[in-house]
Amino acid sequence: MQLDVSGGLLAMTLQHQQTLSGFGTCSIAPHVLQYLKEVKFRVKTGEEIWFDANGDAVACYDLVNWQQEKDGTLQFHAVGLYDSSMPPEQRFTINQGELVWAGGQAEVPVSVCSESCPPGTRKAVQKGKPVCCYDCVPCAEGEISNITDSNGCYRCDLEYWSNEKRDRCVLKPVEFLSYEEIMGIVLVFFSLLGSCVTALVAVVFSIHKDTPIVRANNSELSFLLLFSLTLCFLCSLTFIGRPSEWSCMLRHTAFGITFVLCISCVLGKTIVVLMAFRATLPSSNVMKWFGPPQQRLSVLAFTLIQVLICVLWLTVSPPFPYKNMKTYKEKIILECDVGSAIGFWAVLGYIGLLALLCFVLAFLARKLPDNFNEAKFITFSMLIFCAVWITFIPAYVSSPGKFTVAVEIFAILASSFGLLFCIFAPKCFIILLRPEQNTKKHMMRKTSNDIRY
């Protein structure tokens, strides 16, 4: 940059001549400053010369750029101007297109080694280079940085997670098996379907309650079994939806009690089959020891034991809603913690014990005459029941998140459908499609043939 001072020298010369003409040489000094403040003229170049109130010359600078020509010589080129006599917004002008930076570049060079790191990243110093040289490393999942050139990333709180840009913590989504999602809708459909089919079977049995095939298979226990199966299908609905304190306690206790009621009815029917066959033997009065009152009492006793286990479980350490943040880092699994693991496995274990006992007794009675052949179907139903729940244990332990609940519902529905179809489908087939076989004469003829065989 350069300042043209020739105008100032000229102004001093002119003013000095004017002062000498009006005053003596000894008295001109005090008046020089006053006259300089009032000087204002234009030189041959067209530049106007004048001084401000402080006696300072008006600044006017050319902004020059040192540029290399094609022949290799270096020349100064004016690329801008600073003029203090202009209004403030017009004092400095520059032509960016005329500027040439070091190395012949047209872009403005940066004064740092690396660009600024945006939010969502942190600075990582490059080894062996100045401190201003660094890499921008994206923040890890669950961490954020919300300022430029952050030296580190900060972890979100436990219930929060980083967004995609890693510059803000947002609440983690809460996941549970709901009625709105496809898997929940499918499970609800099969649950209601099982309930409707069970109710339809009950209607069929009620209409034909006086027929031999219904009476031969203990109609009272059959209706109680159908009622308990309906409850088994419906109890699966308590596993769907947002877990709460009451729903967590209801789902496990309802499941445990209804299934024990169901298995108790099957066990009672199995014992009736064995006792009824022994009653056909000469001088046998065994049925008086296991008549209808004893059957009701046995079902009640088996069920009350499960009720007692559930009461102790709910008293000592009941199930409760729990936010699982360990399975997934980016979301919260809202599930029911069983509270006391001993109570939970005691409920399942008692159901398994009754199912195993029922399977053994039905297996022993599988070769009885055809009118007592319900034991064959009970054996097969218990085989399906045990297979489902044995498979359930590893699947339940290994399934993550809401799929744990789905596995448990699937086990409930699969075992309930197994009991329903294995025990009642053959009877409904005869009642509805083979009514000629639903006669006492036909039943007795088959029995006589089987006994002779």
Image (tube, helix red, strand yellow):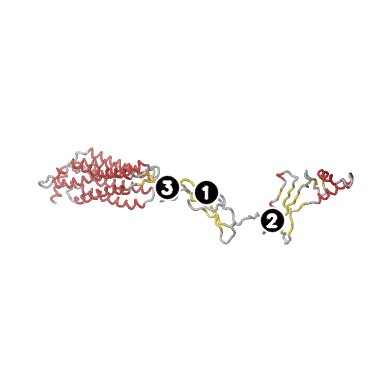
Kind of residue sitting beneath label 2: Val
Q: What is the spatial separation of the Cα atoms under label 1 and label 3, in whole angstroms?
A: 21 Å
Q: Please give left or right for residue 369 compared with residue 345 in the image.
A: left
Decide which of tag 2 and tag 1 comes sooner along the chain: 2
Q: Position of residue 319 (x, y in %)?
A: 34, 45
Kind of residue sitting beneath label 3: Ile
Identify the element where label 2 is drawn: loop
| Residue at the outermost left position | 283
| Residue on which the image places disc 1 | 167
Identify the element where label 3 is drawn: strand
Q: Position of residue 44 (x, y in %)?
A: 83, 49
| Residue at the outermost front position | 26
Q: Are marks 3 and 2 in contact (CB under 8 Å)?
A: no
Decide which of tag 3 and tag 2 comes sooner along the chain: 2
Q: What is the spatial separation of the Cα atoms under label 3 and label 2, in whole angstroms?
A: 58 Å
Label placed on residue 332:
3
Query: Mark 2, residues whose alpha carbon is within 10 Å: few (<14), some, or many (≥20)?
Result: some
Q: Position of residue 407 (x, y in %)?
A: 34, 49
Decide which of tag 1 and tag 3 comes sooner along the chain: 1
- Location of residue 27 (image quadrant): top right
Q: Are marks 2 and 1 in contact (CB under 8 Å)?
A: no
Q: Please give left or right for residue 322 compared with residue 293 in the image.
A: right
Q: Please give left or right for residue 51 compared with residue 361 in the image.
A: right
Query: Mark 1, residues whose alpha carbon is within 10 Å: few (<14), some, or many (≥20)?
Result: many
Closest to the observer: 374 or 174? 174
Identify the element where label 1 is drawn: loop
| Residue on which the image places disc 2 | 100
